[in-house]
Structure formats: structure tokens, C-alpha cells
Image: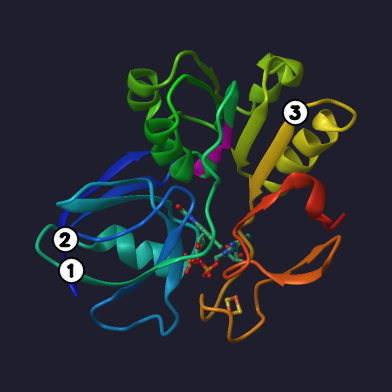
Amino acid sequence: MYNIIENRYLADDMYLMKVEGNLKGEMGQFYMLRTESNYPLLSRPISICDIDENSITFLYKVFGEGTKIFSKLKVGDKINLEGPYGNGYKKVEGKVALVGGGIGVAPLYLVAKNIKNCDAYLGFRNESVLVDEFKEVCNEVFVATNNDFVTKYLDVNKYDYILTCGPTPMMKSLVKMTENTNTKIMVSLENHMACGVGACLVCTCKTNSGNKKTCKDGPVFWGEEVIFND
Ligand SMILES: Cc1cc2nc3c(=O)[nH]c(=O)nc-3n(C[C@H](O)[C@H](O)[C@H](O)COP(=O)(O)OP(=O)(O)OC[C@H]3O[C@@H](n4cnc5c(N)ncnc54)[C@H](O)[C@@H]3O)c2cc1C
Ligand code: FES
């Protein structure tokens, strides 16, 4: 169990939770979070948004019961963290664009801190979050709010790599935009999970080389590998 040292509302049902501890984790990996009461029974996968030797930070959006319970936690409450799990974003060199949709910006903040000289494209359904923080670590930051598509500011040909996380239609259209270009794209899938460690198959996704476990083989895959559901 770890101590919560911050859990504050940002905007549009999104919260920032900071937990005390010297935890491990790479960009694009996630932890399974569960409250002290162990209710709901299953842990919830949440990406590492930021990490240092004293704390780990999660950015989460309230969707259902589990994330609602997280949002009620106070400073000093405890939370169970299991991880880090999964294969995250590969560290790449060259011109890099990060494209985040909604809560998908969460893992990209740690990427932005790790990969210098990248640009960020951040799209939000309503209000934006973490834009100032991205501006501190990125070259250029493009923001779209109120259902505007941030991808309209993106010329994929300007970049060697695109690293994205967000709604499936957004990631699918980005993969399409990179077809027949020299730009490589990594996508982070957010399939439902139960165990988080490759034991239950709840998170199965389809790829060109057969079914894969999002939790163990991913959540980050090369875009060209993934067969998105229609
Ligand atoms: C690898 C990974 C990393 C993630 N990182 C983050 C993160 O950094 N921040 C964050 O806020 N969320 C993240 N998520 C999503 C998060 O795990 C879910 O939103 C959360 O589990 C929902 O739990 P709940 O109990 O609040 O909602 P539930 O009661 O489980 O579900 C509420 C509603 O949301 C739908 N739903 C739940 N989970 C998903 C999902 N994964 N995809 C689509 N619909 C879903 C359900 O069908 C239901 O309609 C991540 C998911 C994965 C797999
Ligand atoms: S969540 Fe159980 S196998 Fe991936």
C-alpha cells in the first residue's frame, strides 16, 4: 500500500493523483490500481503519467465505479499499486510528434519528458489539461478543445515517428495517415483488462501476427501491426 500525497480535480472529470514511493516504470507502461477496501474487486489499469525517485503520478478520468472511487480518495489515504506492467513506447530518435486524445495524453507526458525535441498535439472533448506542463518539455504544442480534431494541425510527413494514445478512431485514422509515408507510428491500446499480467485473455487484440495480449505484449504496438475493430 502506498500513500496518496495529492489527488485533485483538473477539468472535465479528469484528476491527477500523486502517490509517494520509489517506484519503477518506463514511458507507456501502466500500473494496476486498487483501493484499500479492495472494492471494486478488480484493479484498474492506469498509465504512468510521471515518475521520479519520490513519487509516481497518474492522470485519470472518471468513467465508472472504479475511477469514481479513486476520485473520492484523500491525501493520506492508501492505494495498492501493482506494476509496472506492459511494453511501453520505444525510445526513438529523429523528429517525433506525440498525439494524445483526451485521457490519452496521460502516458504521453512521460514520453515528452524522456524524448527531447518533440512536438505535442493534444485534443480534448471539452476542456484541456496538462497543456502548460507539455509546453515546458516540448518544442511546439498544438491544442484542440470542444470536439475540434487536433489531427488537422498535423502533417505526418514532417515527422519520423508518431507516438499516440487516445480514442480508437483517432489512432486508426493516424495509422491510415502514415500509410505510404516514411513515418512510423506507435499506438497504445486501452483494451479492457482484468488481470493485467497475461493470465485471463480479457485484453486480447488482433494483430497481423495473430492475437496478442494488450497487457503483456502491449499496450504499445507499431501501428502497422494492429488490426483495429471497425
Ligand atoms: C494500458 C491501459 C492504460 C490506461 N491508462 C489510463 C490512464 O492513464 N488514465 C485513465 O483515466 N484511464 C486509463 N485507462 C482506462 C482505464 O483503465 C479505464 O477507464 C478504467 O479501468 C475504467 O474503470 P471504471 O471502474 O471507472 O469503469 P467501469 O465501470 O469498468 O466502466 C465504465 C464504462 O467505461 C467503459 N470502459 C471501461 N474501461 C474501458 C476501456 N479500457 N476502454 C473503453 N471503454 C471502457 C465500460 O464499458 C463502461 O461503459 C487505461 C487502460 C489501459 C488498458
Ligand atoms: S488483462 Fe488478463 S491477459 Fe491481459
The quarter of the rendered structure image containing the N terminus is bottom left
What range of the chain is rendered magenta? 99-103
Q: Amino acid at mark 1?
A: Tyr
Kindly report which numbered mark, 1 or 3, lies closer to the viewer in this rendering: 3
Q: Is mark 3 within 8 Å of ligand 1?
A: no
Kindly report which numbered mark, 3 or 2, lies closer to the viewer in this rendering: 3
Residues at circles 3 and 2 in contact by the CB criterion of under 8 Å: no
Residue drawn at point x = 37 percent, y = 32 percent: 113
Q: Which mark is residue 89?
A: none
Which residue is at the front of the view, 67 or 174?
Answer: 174
Identify residue for label 2: 21
Residues at circles 2 and 1 in contact by the CB criterion of under 8 Å: yes
Identify residue for label 3: 183
- The secondary structure type at the circle numbered 2 is loop
Residue drawn at point x = 79 percent, y = 38 percent: 175
Q: Is mark 1 within 8 Å of ligand 1?
A: no
Q: Position of residue 126 (x, y in %)?
A: 52, 31
Q: Is residue 139 left or right of residue 202?
A: left
